[in-house]
Image (cartoon, rainbow, N blue to C red):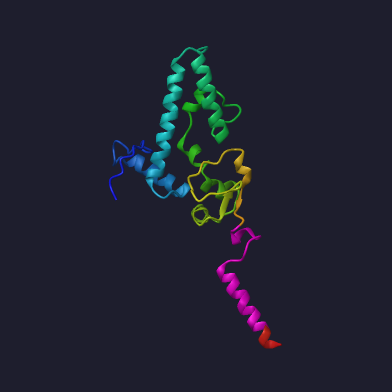
Amino acid sequence: MGKDYRNRSKTSKTPRRPYEKERLDRELKLVGVFGLKNKREIWRVQYTLAKMRSVARHLMTMEEKDPRRVFQGAALIARLSKMGLLDEKEQTLDYVLGLTIEKFLSRRLQTCVFTTLKLAKSIHHSRCLIRQRHIRVGRNLVNVPSFMVNVDSEKLVEYAHTSPLGGNARPGRVKRKKQAQEKEGGDDDV
């Protein structure tokens, strides 16, 4: 095994002040509410949000009729609308600057499985279900809790065909064992 010389771009950015109390409390609350694994998941969302905001800020400095601003601004707004981050009323670049981390985190698969679809008992249970391959989006089995769910694919989130929780698949190990014991117990009485 040699060194890996492939270049990768950064996906998150650590805070400048590591021990700022207000930020630490805010991050800890987000980790608890959205059932995140660590704070890097928050920093990753902050980084993507910062990149989108900087693009929007740069486009807003251009003239209103500039073809580049019109084209790239429409593309950015369409992408954010497709992700479910902007409503039909919020179709301007001003609303891109107003996006929050909570709005991004609410579009994750983990949050959708718990809050909107009610497939899990808690936010942590939804993370377990996703990691244990019980959830699919459309035809694809997804085992990444941070998967961003589009507006279109939100209707397609359900239990996987192979999952015993879905009801239409093979029962789980414990249920099969209980059924075998019942079958053996029922035969002795006859």
Q: Residue at x 29, y 51 (%)?
A: 1
Asked if 188 appears above or below 126 in the picture, the reply is below
Q: Principal SS element in the magenta part?
A: helix
Residue 176 at x, y percent in the picture: 60, 71
Asked if 43 appears above or below 172 in the picture, the reply is above
Q: Residue at x 57, y 26 (%)?
A: 90
Q: Quadrant of the C terminus?
A: bottom right
Q: Say whether residue 23 is left or right of residue 182.
A: left
Instruction: In this rendered view, identify the residue nearer to me: 136 or 59.
Output: 136
**Quarter residue 169 falls in:** bottom right
- The answer to if 75 sits in the magenta stretch is no
Q: Residue furthest front?
A: 1
Instruction: In this rendered view, identify the residue nearer to me: 10 or 4.
Output: 4
How many numbered marks have been drawn onto this rendered protein structure?
A: 0
Residue 57 at x, y percent in the picture: 43, 22
Q: Residue at x 46, y 18 (%)?
A: 60
Q: Say whether residue 6 is left or right of residue 29.
A: left
**Quarter residue 42 falls in:** top left
**Quarter residue 22 falls in:** top left
Residue 2 at x, y percent in the picture: 28, 47
Q: Say whether residue 163 is left or right of residue 37.
A: right
Instruction: In this rendered view, identify the residue nearer to me: 134 or 35.
Output: 134
Instruction: Look at the image and give the residue range highlighted in magenta.
Output: 162-186
Asked if 52 appears above or below 174 in the picture, the reply is above
